[in-house]
Amino acid sequence: MNTTAASEKIGFIGLGLMGHGIAKNIVDKGYALTFLGRKNRAPAQDLLGRGAEEAATSRDVAVASDIVFICVTGSREVEAIIRGPGGLKEGLKKGAVVVDCSTSDPTSTVTLAAELKALGVDYVDAPLSRTPKEAWEGTLDAMVGASDAVFARLKPVLDTWAG
């Protein structure tokens, strides 16, 4: 692991075709990564082999992380990850950032942002463009909706997988 990477601890939920590549690049660029595995164990085994750590619940990912990326199908899944039993809301620390890379409904995004802001957590909408090939290569496009300060904080991590 690259010890010169920023001290931000990264969480990741959603190890599908896009998420696995993103998470791989975050770890390979030296960030500490805690992820939530899924039924398909191949991505989890790959990340464990690269030095990442696996959590049992979304809450555990939140507890271990300063910044949490979510890369799942859409709003329904994002809402369950955040609000559900063992969800992110149970473990997020004040000052944390949640980055939603899913294709989410704007109404849901605004509602979740308000809920998390009340906890002192920033919520960032960052849908993706391109394919799993670019995710693996670290050259995805992301349209990031964040304040200047939050974007500046996220940029070094985004640079590991977006280009």
Image (spheres, grey):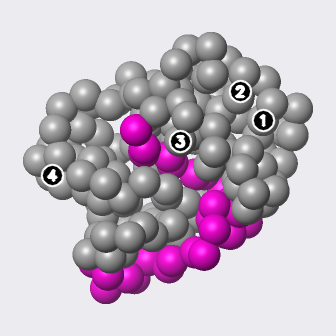
Tag 4 residue: 137
Q: Is residue 54 magenta?
A: yes
The amino acid type of the residue labelled 1 equals Leu
| Callout 3 crowding tier (Cα within 10 Å): few <14, some 14–19, many ≥20 | some
Front: mark 3 or 4: 3
51 or 155, which lies in front? 51
The amino acid marked with disc number 3 is Glu
- In depth, the one of 123 and 2 nearer the eye is 123
In this rendering, the label closer to the viewer, 3 or 1? 3
Residue lying at the far right in this picture: please name it: 118
Q: CA distance from mark 2 to mark 4?
A: 30 Å
The three-letter code of the residue at mark 2 reads Ala
| Dot 1 and dot 2 residues touching (CB under 8 Å) | yes
First in sequence: mark 2 or mark 4? Answer: 2
Q: CA distance from mark 2 to mark 3?
A: 15 Å
Q: Nearer the viewer, mark 2 or mark 4?
A: 2
Residue span colored magenta: 45-73
12, above or below 78, in the image: below
Residue 12 coordinates in the image, percent (x, y) = 49, 58
> Who comes first in sequence, dot 2 or dot 3?
3
- Residue position marked by numbered label 3 in the rendering: 77
